[in-house]
Every structure is written in C-alpha cells, then in structure tokens.
Image (cartoon, grey):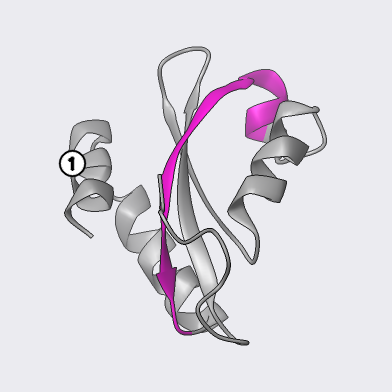
Amino acid sequence: MGVNTSAPGPHAWAVYLLECSDGRVYTGIARDPEKRYAQHAAGKGARFTRSNPPQRLLGWVWVESKSAALKLEIAWKRLPRAERVAALRAQ
C-alpha cells in the first residue's frame, strides 16, 4: 500500500486496486483511496464492488491529475489481473 497516504499535491489523484471476494481485482480512481475503499466495503461504491465485496485494498499510485488517473485506470483495466498487480508494485 502507498506509504504516503495523503495526496502529494492539490490536484493529485490516486489509481487504486482492490482485491474482491471472488478473486478479481477492481481498479478505480480517487482523491482519498482509503476513504474510497471504506465506501466500497460499506456497499456504497461501484456496482461491481456491491456484488463482489472488496476484501482488501492492494495499494495505489499517485498521479498529477484526474486526467492522468483516468488514462492510467483505462490502461490498467486492459491488463490481466497478475500484470495489473505487478504494475502497481512496480510504481
């Protein structure tokens, strides 16, 4: 998980990964990934995580803007699960 939990700048966004109960990995973006994970865990997140509750927050990476976060999210969603997790760990 990210060591520095607060955003490094006023416009920074995080791309985060959640491991869900069915073993799949959910990829999303947020300004506060820990708060967003709590929302997912409470059943108030995305439709996917309401039907596949998250088991743990795998981690996140900070990027400089929402636009950059959306682009990275799309790129990671195209990767198989193992490659997505490896990409997170490589950051």
Residue 16's place in the image compared with 37, above or below, is: below
How many marks the image carries: the answer is 1
Residue 79 appears in the picture as rendered: no
Q: Nearer the viewer, residue 7 or 82?
A: 7
| Mark 1 neighbour density, 10 Å: few (under 14) some (14–19) many (20 or more) | few
Residue 52, percent from left and from top: 61, 20
Side (left or right) of 69 relative to 41: left
* Quadrant (top left/top right/bottom left/bottom right) for the C terminus: bottom left
Residue 61 painted magenta: yes
In this rendering, the answer to whether 50 lies above or below 79 is above
Residue at mark 1: 83
Whether residue 56 is visible, yes or no, is yes
Residue in the image at 43% along x and 79% along y: 68
Q: Position of residue 5 (x, y in %)?
A: 53, 58
- The quarter of the picture where residue 75 lies is bottom left
Q: On the picture, is 2 further left or further right than 65? A: left
Amino acid residing under circle 1 = Glu
Q: Where does the image place residue 14, in percent across and percent down from the top left?
A: 50, 64
Q: Quadrant of the N terminus?
A: top left
Residue that appears at 65% across and 30% down: 49
Q: Is residue 81 left or right of residue 26?
A: left
Seen at 51% across and 26% down, the residue is: 56
Give the magenta-colored segment's residue range: 48-64
> Looking at the picture, how far across and down is residue 42, in whole percent?
80, 28
